[in-house]
Image (cartoon, rainbow, N blue to C red):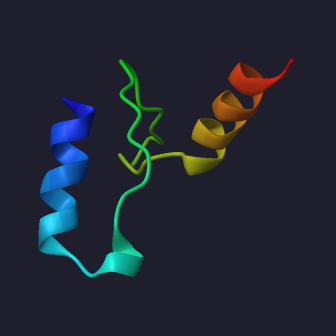
Amino acid sequence: MGDDLISYVAGQVARYKKVRRVEFTDFVPGSATGKILRRELRAGERSSTAP
């Protein structure tokens, strides 16, 4: 599914805007107002790639 998404986007946008990586998650952290908490997504990425 990720490869299909990457190839679709590659056909729609300029070369420098192409998506290089797609990650799927079951939970997206949000604030009380419904905004995505990107800092928590980044923290989760750092903890999952730690050796």
Q: Residue visible at 21% across and 76% down? A: 13
Between 10 and 30, the residue placed more toward the observer is 10
49 w.r.t. 36: above or below: above
Between 38 and 7, the residue placed more toward the observer is 7
Between 23 and 10, the residue placed more toward the observer is 10
Specify whether 13 is left or right of 20. Answer: left
10 w.r.t. 3: above or below: below
Q: Residue visible at 73% across and 25% down? A: 49
Query: Residue 17 at x, y = what percent?
Result: 36, 75
Query: Residue 44 at x, y = what percent?
Result: 66, 28
**Label total for image:** 0
The residue at the far right in this view is 51
Query: Residue 35 at x, y = what percent?
Result: 40, 51
Specify whether 4 is left or right of 3. Answer: left
For the N terminus, the image quarter is top left
Q: In which quarter of the image is residue 46?
A: top right
Between 19 and 29, the residue placed more toward the observer is 19
Query: Residue 19 at x, y = what percent?
Result: 36, 58
Q: In which quarter of the image is residue 40?
A: top right
For the C terminus, the image quarter is top right
Q: Residue visible at 34% across and 67% down? A: 18
Specify whether 19 is left or right of 2. Answer: right
